[in-house]
Amino acid sequence: MVELNSLRQFLVVARLEHLSRAAEELRVAQPSLSRTIARLESELGTPLFDRSGRLRLNDAGRLFRDHVERSLGELDAGRRAVAEAGSAGLGAVRLASETFLTLTGPLAAYKRAHPSAELELQWSPAEDMPRRLRAQDVDLCVSSQPIHADGLESVRLFDDAVGVGTALDHPLARRASVRIEELAGQPFVTARRGHWLRRLLDRVFAARDLTPKIVCEADEPGAIAELIGAGLGIGLVPGFARRTAVRAPLTWVAVDSPDCRRRVTLHWATGSHLSPAAQLMRDTISGWDWPAGDR
């Protein structure tokens, strides 16, 4: 009989596709983890990984992973439901997003209205969101680009034009708009790979058979804005950021291209159990007056 711990360990190995890193994350010895995976494959009667060179999840492994994620997600959801039934509170809500700068208004309003609700915020890249939602690892996700995946329900929050930020004395700062082709060769300050801003930059350039010249990668939106304002380069800046507390000395120039924008979307898993706290969070975010923001 397959043990739950073996299934949870399999999911970590399937996610990382690397035994030593999985063993480190799980805090178990690598030989022990290898035996667990081998025993699981023996019980199933088929390999779950390709082992020619780097460890890779095969078709059977991907199929099994999807079922294990759903099964363990349902088990965890059942535990939470029982805990909520015995509690008079609203329960907890786990929200994952690519950026929380956009969400400060509704999050603050939610906390003021429901101070007893337990709120857990997690950063997540968009590509991990479908898996995490289906596994009920998180309740809600907010992505900055649409996610096309089965088993999810979504509501669009707002569309946001993404422009170019420049230093105040940059030659482009006097322009009302600029085309992507005109930005080829310009030094860019941007986010690391996996961040929605970086994916958008790479995508709009690739659509024109161009490659952006990246001179600096940063993790924090405020740091990116400050570096742009200091003249280290230009960078993509969402229109929404112009209404936030980040007031770096830079100029925002519109990009004359319909694909240089982001679509912010709220997602949850179809048929998932949402606590009262999670339902209230979904209502707060989806019902927020996004054009007005918190002004």
Image (spheres, rainbow, N blue to C red):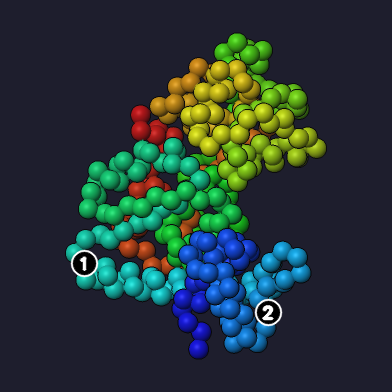
Q: Position of residue 42 (x, y in %)?
A: 62, 86
User: Which residue is denoted by mark 2 in the rendering?
Assistant: 47
Q: Left or right of 67: which side holds 107? A: left
Q: Position of residue 272 (x, y in %)?
A: 43, 67
Kindly identify the residue that appears in the image at 38 percent across and 39 percent down. 104
Q: How many marks?
A: 2
| Quadrant for the C terminus in the image | top left
Q: State which quadrant residue 200 falls in.
A: top right
Q: Please, what is the three-letter code of the amino acid marked with disc 1?
A: Ser
Q: Left or right of 82: which side holds 29? A: right
Kindly identify the residue that appears in the image at 80 percent across and 37 percent down. 209
Is residue 72 shown to the viewer in this render?
yes
Q: Please, what is the three-letter code of the amino acid marked with disc 2?
A: Pro
In depth, the one of 192 and 75 nearer the eye is 192
User: Which residue is denoted by mark 1 in the rendering?
Assistant: 87
How much space separates mark 2 and mark 1, taking CA atoms?
44 Å
Residue 148's place in the image compared with 19, above or below, is above
- Secondary structure beneath dot 2 equals loop
Q: Left or right of 55: which side holds 276? A: left
Q: State which quadrant residue 212 falls in.
A: top right
Kindly identify the residue that appears in the image at 39 percent across and 34 percent down. 293
Density class for disc 1 (Cα within 10 Å; few <14, some 14-19, many ≥20) is few
Residue furthest to the left in view is 88
Q: Which mark is residue 16?
A: none
Q: Position of residue 196 (x, y in %)?
A: 58, 42
